[in-house]
Image: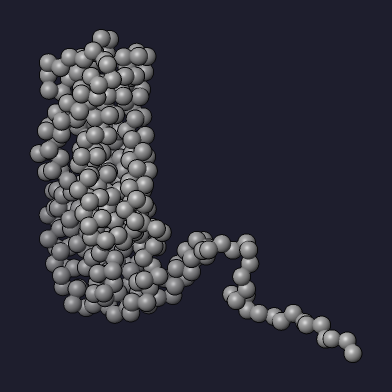
Amino acid sequence: MEAATPQPVDAPIDAVSTPQSGKSDVVGQVMGALKAAVASPAFWPAVIVAIGLTLCFLPLWPRLKDLWGSADGYYSHGPIVPLISAFVIFKWWPRIKTTPVKPGLLAIPFLLATLFLMYPANASRIEGLMSLGLLTTMLLGTWAVAGWRWMLNLAGPILYLGFALPLWTAIINNTTNPLQIISTNVAFQLLKLCGFLVYQSDPTVIYMNSFVLNVEVACSGLKLLLALTAFTIFFVMIARLKLWANIMAIAMIPFFALLVNGLRIALIGVVGETWGSEAGLKFHDYSGYITLVLCFFVLFKVFRWLGWKD
């Protein structure tokens, strides 16, 4: 008697594991999240609130374009901040998607009051107040549309957008000159350690044999400090390390920023002294972006060392 040959059994597609599908299908996850968002009862109210906020803060948007596109400004990292904020929401989505949507009518009076108070700021182009008002209304709008718990869940990514907004004018004005002097001193000492003959008669000027390093306001290190802070907070939000590790990472920001900025200035001097002033000036123009990429990579390694596994 012949043994019966087993017949293949049809199985649901989602129950079959194929070698082609990796540990996670990022595109599938994104599409699934978008479909879930569109199907949510809060989707269209959220769209209406977003359009309203866009119109209410219309004077702010052209200013952001100028801030982000300025080569000598402090917000060259600005364009990637909304992308980072969206990525954080994507990473948090499995944890927050089950939060029930309960529109918070209590938020509406606070939202209207905030928009009323923002009218003079918009009319007078007070950038700091407009930025603060935008973040506040985004939080209140989330509360009104989806509820208090959704506002708390999304508070981190929303407030993170502040790194791309002109909120930091007072800090920039008060700390630029001290950081400018410190960065110059760091570069001076690094050049001396490398054996270059350098002379400093002004707190922000370094004289070399055939090249002069004039550390302007844009090279003070505050630009790098702001970007490093944004990168570090991003890693803090997605790495979810222990408190001591987060404190250690945040505490190292100013020291790391001043060291890297001083090294960048010193390298400009090395290039200018070795290959001429034109080469030094060209390296100055591109070194800022190189420094940002390098710092992002170093921070990634630091958080791995502190225990980030995912």
How many numbered discs, if any?
Answer: 0
- Percent across and percent down for residue 237 are 30, 59
- Nearer to us in this view, 301 or 272: 301
- Nearer to us in this view, 250 or 86: 250
- Quarter of the image where one finds residue 143: bottom left
- Percent across and percent down for residue 187 are 22, 25
- Quarter of the image where one finds residue 135: bottom left
Q: Residue at x 38, y 68 (%)?
A: 93
Viewed as shown, does residue 163 lie left or right of 34? left
- Quarter of the image where one finds residue 243: bottom left
Q: Residue at x 37, y 43 (%)?
A: 297
Q: Residue furthest bottom?
A: 1
Q: Residue at x 15, y 23 (%)?
A: 204
Q: Residue furthest left?
A: 174
Viewed as shown, does residue 197 lie left or right of 15? left
Q: Is residue 290 visible?
A: yes
- Percent across and percent down for residue 129 are 14, 53
Viewed as shown, does residue 17 lie left or right of 217? right
Q: Is residue 53 visible?
A: no
Quadrant in which the C terminus appears: bottom left
